[in-house]
Amino acid sequence: MQTNNLEKHGASPVVRHILIITDFNKKIIMNILNEADEIINKRSEEKERMYGPFEEGMERAALIASGCTGKKITAEDMYMCMVALKLSRQSYFEKTDNLLDAVAYLGSLQNYINKKNK
C-alpha cells in the first residue's frame, strides 16, 4: 500500500514509517537472495578456473582443517564455519556483503547436500 493510501485509511505516521521500512527491507532481502543465487548457481568460468570447483574446494579445505586439528571435519562443517564467520563479522560491523556471503554459503551447502544424496 502506498503512503498516500495509508494516509487515506487513517494510518498513523509511525505505522506508515514502519511499513515503508518493511518494504525497503523486503527489497534488500530479495536483492541479497538474487545476488546469492548468482554467486551459487551462475558462478563464472573464470572464478572456476581461478579457485576450482566450489564444492571440491570445501572438501579440500575440510581435509586440510582435519590435518591441522587432528579432528574429523567435513565439507558440511566447512560451509557452516564460513556461515558462522560471516555472522560473527556482521555482529561487529553491519555490512550487506556479510549477509550475502552467509546466504550464499547456505545455498551452496544445500546444493552440495543435494548432489551428495543423489
Image (cartoon, helix red, strand yellow):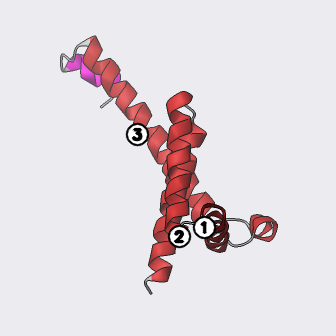
Real-space Cα distance between discs 2 and 1?
5 Å
Tell me: 12 left or right of 105: left
Task: Name the spot of residue 30 as percent of width and height, x first.
Answer: 46, 47
Relative depth, front residue between 117 and 22: 117
Please identify the residue farthest to the left as the structure is shown.
10
Badge 1 is on which residue?
A: 66
Disc 3 or 1, which lies upstream in sequence? 3
Q: Amino acid at mark 1?
A: Ser
Q: Which mark is residue 72?
A: 2
Secondary structure mostly seen in magenta is helix
Most foreground residue, 12 or 43 = 43
Q: How many marks?
A: 3
Which residues lie in the magenta part? 3-8
Q: Of marks 3 and 2, which one's residue comes earlier in the chain?
A: 3
Q: Which residue is mark 3?
A: 26
| Pair 3/1: label in front | 1
Q: Quadrant of residue 89?
A: top right
Q: Nearer the viewer, residue 21 or 86?
A: 86
Tell me the kind of residue under disc 3.
Answer: Lys
Q: Quadrant of the N terminus?
A: top left
* Circles 2 and 1: CB atoms closer than 8 Å: yes
> Residue 81 in the image: x percent, y percent?
53, 54
Left or right of 15? Residue 86 is: right
Badge 3: residue crowd in 10 Å (few <14, some 14–19, many ≥20)? few
